Image: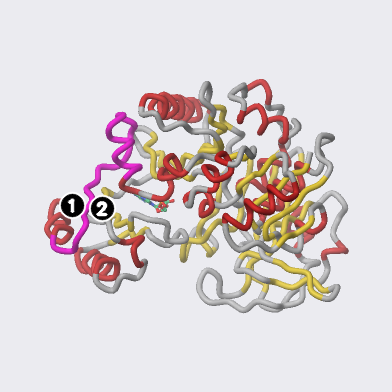
């Protein structure tokens, strides 16, 4: 088969790496790819969904796998299906579960899926009146896709007013901030369930724990994720069962509402004192979750994706390693704020042979490997014990160098 992967991060490198091990695969293309995907795929520069469609038609691509949310939310699956091309991911209508917070909250409320109490507003006057009803902290969310930066936890009324003005008056997110969801603050710890969803079934993948904050001890700004462990060491079997039950209710609700969903659904939960509540959906694999989940998957990912597309996926199709996988993401100094790119990366060739390095933000230029993003490399180990995986990752990181290298030492 000829496979096309859309995206250029660590998640897409991990997908490319995994499917390159499939006997069904002859050729992999990656749009736009990075310095890591080059090891297993051919990188292709394409600018938008139409260019990607034309490429797929021209090369007679057998299967397209979409990594990030933007092409899904813009309707690439609908476009490919209209052209009789096989593609893995939800259609635009269902992708609203990521592209609109209001759509998601309404869906959850209508279907009595546990989630934080909320109101939504379309202008600043309504919102200022509305926040009188809430206690602090409260959570303000711009409705649309804001590159993961659209959520604010406000400690007091002054902060809440500032954020509402930023969104409605200063329009820091443009049209993505035309609506705002205000919701109660939930305390607890977060866990996510990444599931394969078909018309007939919802099948959770193994669970991972994502480290979202840039600083050690979970301090500082939120990031896309700077470390990850699978299985999640915090989660009991009892809680896991509750998450799976909620995921099954979600799948039933999707069917009931005629939201034909096929692809990956990433369900973000807050586990508070009473019960797990849904915080958010993503309509794609997580990053860096994918970098620790796929090394533990023994089954053929292409087969699994094809079975999901054909609505035949079952839990038993997924065979998992009992080992523990840990990844630490090496970042560019300054991330998630401003950072420099174009730094030469040295030392990868000196790593142990069983360390897996997924590239998040790198490019090859004249034989050199350069940094090209805020997250640069995910240094990953798969070992029988968590402590051993951790030790191996940190020993190996010592051998990698680029200017401004930063990473958390407490993953
Ligand atoms: P979201 O994009 O909705 O998941 O929000 C991003 C992050 O904000 C989540 O991963 C949580 O850490 C935090 N968050 C969102 N909603 C809430 C809430 N209602 N209570 C507490 N924290 C929240
Ligand atoms: N790691 C969280 C995400 O992929 O959105």
Q: Is 106 one of the magenta-colored residues?
A: yes
97 sits to left or right of 233: left
Q: Ligand 1: does it lie within 8 Å of the C-beta at label 2? A: no
Circle 2 — which element?
strand
Residue at 55% x, 38% y: name it: 264
Q: Which of 329 and 375 is in front in this view?
A: 375
Residue at 84% x, 59% y: name it: 351
| Picture mark count | 2
| Residue 148 rendering spot, x and y as whole percentages | 46, 58
Q: Is residue 314 above or below residue 321?
A: above
Depth check, mark 2 against mark 1: the one in front is 2
Using the numbered discs, state the Cα–Cα distance from disc 2 to disc 1 in whole angstroms: 9 Å
| Residue 248 rendering spot, x and y as whole percentages | 45, 25
Residue 233, can we see it? Answer: no
Quarter that holds the N terminus: top right
402 sits to left or right of 104: right
Q: Name the residue under label 2.
A: 182
Q: Is residue 295 above or below residue 164?
A: above
Q: What stretch is highlighted in magenta?
A: 103-125
Circle 1 — which element?
loop
Residue 317, can we see it? Answer: yes
**Which labelled disc corresponds to residue 195?**
none
Quarter that holds the C terminus: bottom right
| Residue 145 rendering spot, x and y as whole percentages | 42, 57
Q: How crowded is mark 2: few (under 14 residues within 10 Å), some or many (20 or more)?
A: many
For residue 410, which quarter of the picture? bottom right
Specify which label sits upstream in the sequence, 2 or 1: 1
* Label 2 close to label 1 by CB (< 8 Å): yes
Q: Is 110 one of the magenta-colored residues?
A: yes
Q: Name the residue under label 1.
A: 134
Q: Nearer the viewer, residue 58 or 268?
A: 58
319 sits to left or right of 186: right
């Amino acid at each position: 088969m000829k496979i096309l992967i859309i995206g250029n991060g660590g998640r897409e490198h991990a997908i490319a790496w995994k499917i390159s091990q499939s006997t069904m695969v002859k050729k992999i293309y990656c749009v736009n790819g990075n310095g890591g995907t080059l090891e297993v795929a051919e990188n292709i520069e394409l600018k938008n969904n139409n260019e990607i469609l034309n490429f797929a038609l021209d090369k007679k691509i057998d299967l397209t796998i979409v990594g990030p949310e933007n092409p899904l939310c813009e309707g690439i699956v609908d476009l490919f299906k209209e052209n009789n091309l096989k593609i893995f991911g939800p259609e635009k209508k269902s992708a609203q579960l990521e592209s609109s917070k209001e759509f998601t909250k309404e869906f959850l409320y209508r279907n009595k899926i546990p989630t934080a109490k909320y109101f939504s507003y379309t202008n600043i006057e309504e919102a200022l009146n509305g926040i009188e009803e809430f206690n602090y902290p409260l959570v303000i969310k711009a409705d649309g896709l804001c590159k993961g930066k659209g959520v604010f936890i406000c400690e007091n009324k002054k902060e809440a007013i500032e954020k509402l003005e930023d969104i409605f008056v200063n329009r820091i997110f443009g049209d993505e901030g035309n609506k705002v969801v205000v919701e109660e603050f939930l305390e607890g710890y977060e866990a996510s369930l990444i599931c394969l969803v078909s018309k007939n079934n919802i099948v959770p993948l193994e669970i991972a724990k994502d480290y979202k904050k840039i600083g050690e001890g979970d301090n500082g700004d939120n990031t896309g994720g700077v470390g990850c462990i699978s299985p999640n060491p915090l989660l009991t079997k009892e809680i896991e069962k509750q998450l799976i039950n909620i995921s099954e209710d979600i799948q039933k609700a999707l069917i009931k509402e005629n939201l034909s969903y096929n692809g990956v659904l990433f369900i973000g939960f807050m586990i508070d004192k009473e019960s797990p509540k849904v915080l958010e959906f993503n309509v794609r694999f997580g990053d860096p979750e994918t970098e620790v989940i796929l090394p533990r998957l023994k089954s053929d990912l292409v087969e699994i994706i094809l079975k999901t597309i054909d609505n035949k996926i079952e839990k038993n199709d997924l065979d998992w390693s009992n080992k523990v996988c840990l990844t630490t993401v090496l970042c560019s100094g300054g991330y998630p704020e401003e950072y420099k790119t174009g730094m030469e990366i040295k030392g990868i060739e000196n790593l142990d042979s069983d360390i897996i390095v997924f590239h998040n933000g790198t490019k090859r230029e004249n034989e050199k490997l350069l940094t090209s993003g805020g997250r640069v490399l995910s240094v990953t180990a798969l070992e029988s014990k968590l402590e051993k995986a951790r030790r191996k990752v940190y020993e190996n990181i010592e051998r990698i160098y680029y200017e401004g290298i930063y990473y958390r030492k407490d993953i």
